Image: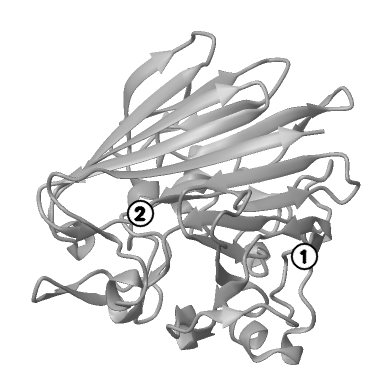
Amino acid sequence: MRPFGKLEDSRSVEAITLGDPQGLQAEVLTYGAILRRLTFPVRGQRRDLILSLPTLGHYVNDRAYVGALVGRFGNRIANARFSLDGREYAVTANEGVNHLHGGALGFGKRLWRVLARNASDVPQLELGLSSPAGEEGYPGHLDVTATFAAMPDSLRITLRARTDAATPVNLTYHPYFNLAADARMPATGQSLRIPASHYLPVRSGLIPTGEFASVEDSTFDFRRARPLAPPDPGTHAQLALAGGYDHCWVLDPGADCTCELRSPDGDLTLTLRGNGPGLQFYNGQFLAQAHPDIGSGVILEPQGLPNAPNEPAFPTSILRPGDEYRAEIVYHVAS
């Protein structure tokens, strides 16, 4: 654990490193529970697998969610409104008329508590956060924990939450991946496999239409690994809406993983596993507008389905008192 600066109100932020010095290592900030670094030795050199920002001030001012834990509801809620048990709730509209990644602050802009640290055979870190009822417009007081367990070749993140009133919950992580030895290399030079036969088309504001569209014979078919660079947005109406890929794939039942990402040179493979039904893939087309100097990266977020509170046909995102929300994300690397 080392100091990583202070917030404007003088609260201290720590950076905590866990993992095998000869294998995978992760650095986590208590600010935003941000996954700041993920590194792995490749051909004798330690390689950064995700993009990072240099200082706490950069993270405080960041609006691209670099490495952040996003919630209370990751992804979008249409018109920043939903109905639950006969009552309508208005949450913060922070992307036009829509709600994105938990609102104006969200969990990625909060200071988390260190609940436990364990330096045993499997180094672990547990962070905690309490979100009061009414925060960003959400009902229910929510207690959240994020547990990190570092193995020599993988990082397992377990996200848990409990509430005292029914509320939507969809937690995930938002690191920008670039497995190349040089993050200035285009991240779209990587190869990607997504075991999903369907994706969610979107309308204006990147809100799902509610349709489960087949990927067959389309640029959305990643069932076999292929370079992830999108074609010209003008070739497909969905790409034109998002300026590239920024869609949710619906994983096939029994899928062997959530996705598999390979470096441009083929010398490193990251296999991502999550227990959510969806994977949001964003090819990072607007990252340079926010951070022109950190390199190129793509987002791969295992999660529940976007706008689920307003889509009865989607798997429910509602957590109720007495139940526990649990999401697990595993990043496994091999060279």
SS type, badge 2: loop
The quadrant in which residue 296 appears is: bottom right
Crowding at mark 2 (Cα within 10 Å: few <14, some 14-19, many 20+):
many
Query: What's the residue type where badge 2 is placed?
Result: Gly
Quarter of the picture holding the C terminus: top right
Q: Residue at x 61, y 64 (%)?
A: 281
Q: Which residue is mark 1?
A: 228
* Relative side of 55 to 118, left or right: right
Which tag, 2 or 1, sits closer to the chain's start? Answer: 2
Give me the residue at 19% from left, 74% from top.
90
| x, y percent for residue 155 | 57, 31
Q: Is residue 131 left or right of residue 231?
A: left
Q: Note whether 6 is above or below 309 in the view shown.
A: above
x, y percentage for residue 251? 56, 62
Instruction: Point out residue 117 in the picture as x, y percentages from the top left corner.
Output: 40, 16
* 45 with respect to 217 (left or right): right
**In the rendered view, would you say 262 is above or below 100?**
above
Name which residue lies at 13% across and 54% down.
140
Residue 71 has which mark? 2
As measured in the structure, the alpha-carbon distance from the residue carrying label 2 to the one carrying label 1 is 27 Å
Q: Residues within 10 Å of mark 1 (few under 14, many from 20)?
A: many
Check the image and name the residue furthest to the top: 120
Which mark identifies residue 149?
Answer: none
At which x and y percent is residue 58? 52, 47
Indicate the secondary structure of the residue bearing disc 1.
loop
User: Is residue 219 in view from this perspective?
Assistant: yes
Q: How is the image coloured?
A: one colour
* Residue at the extreme front: 254
